[in-house]
Amino acid sequence: MGGRRKGEPGERGEREPGEPGEPAAVRPVLKWAGGKSQLLAAYARFFPRPGANRAYHEPFFGGGAVFFALRPPAGACLSDLNAELIHFYEVVRDAPAELLAHFAIHQNDRRYYNDVRAQDPAALGDVARASRFLYLNRAGYNGLYRVNRGGDFNVPYGTQRDPVGSVDAANLHRAAALLRGATLLCADFALVVERARAGDFVYFDPPYQPQSATASFTDYTAGSFGAGEQERLAAVAADLDARGCLVMLSNSDVPAVRRLYSQAPFRLFTVPARRVINCRADRRGPVNEVVIVNYDVPEEATPAAGNGRRPGENG
């Protein structure tokens, strides 16, 4: 394609999974609502080629599915405004064996879960604090992380039969090894502007714009992520583009998001997904998301209606 920005998706020259010498896959350590594990195959066409000097930045790190899948060779800066999350990954990186040993003491019991949830994490040691975080993630409802206005975790007990046994120790150790090559920061997403350089790849997976007025879930930290934050994120993406960075974002496929990224250099592509976070099974099901990039992608990707629409596409 003409006008291709250096580093766009294309022939990566990498070994296929399972070939001799291919490192064992690393899966996310956490269950994470809105995590991208199920969309990695659909996202693969959008990822730029890795480069010796192309650092990776992910300001809404969450479950980290994209980072663990890409295994960026030139280092990474992983950040999130969730202090408990970043602390957890620091302990995974620095003390995985100690974390697993402490995690093994937890119980699959509703009353026990509520007692652990009521603990003040700031009063715990580093390993115990990270162990609590992992237990609440595994035993809580559907991998949600939600806090009230006071910043207290308030997700109810879930239905996982064996939350302790569900953690893959070998995978956690592989994740720890990958994290040792990354910088972890508890920071606002806008900090990436100060750290990213021309040619770096920046991936944003923010709290999604609600599909409807009653579908809002933005209380990931004590402050919600509303329309104003979505607009600020779009401005940061434009700033990174001006600096020569490769930018990719994912969000819900709604008019408000399309409007924010309706102008060049951004292009929007529809990605079918599945909504799984709802207490009512009849409200879970197929839903479209959008991937937004500032570089060219292979032709098989389908532009979202309203930006790069192909002939015959519906609006």
Image (cartoon, rainbow, N blue to C red):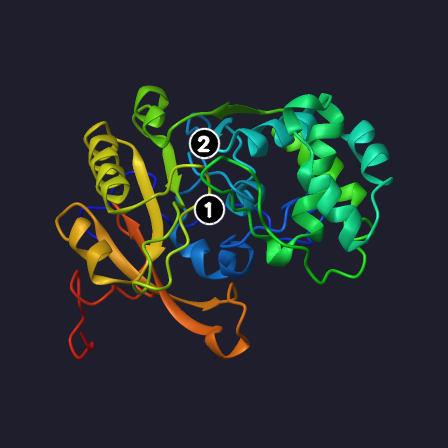
Snapshot quadrant of residue 103? top right
Snapshot quadrant of residue 158? bottom right
Given this view, does label 1 or label 2 mark the residue nearer the observer? 2
Quadrant of the rendering where the N terminus is positioned: bottom left
| Residue carrying label 1 | 12
How far separated are the C-alphas under marks 1 and 2?
32 Å
User: Residue 296 got which mark?
Assistant: none
| Residue carrying label 2 | 81
Secondary structure under tag 1 reads: loop
Residue 59 drawn at (x, y percent): 42, 34
Q: Compare residues 108 and 6 and report the one nearer the observer.
A: 108
Snapshot quadrant of residue 50? top left
Tag 1 near tag 2, CB within 8 Å: no
What count of labels does the image hold? 2
The amino acid pointed to by label 2 is Leu
Quadrant of the rendering where the C terminus is positioned: bottom left
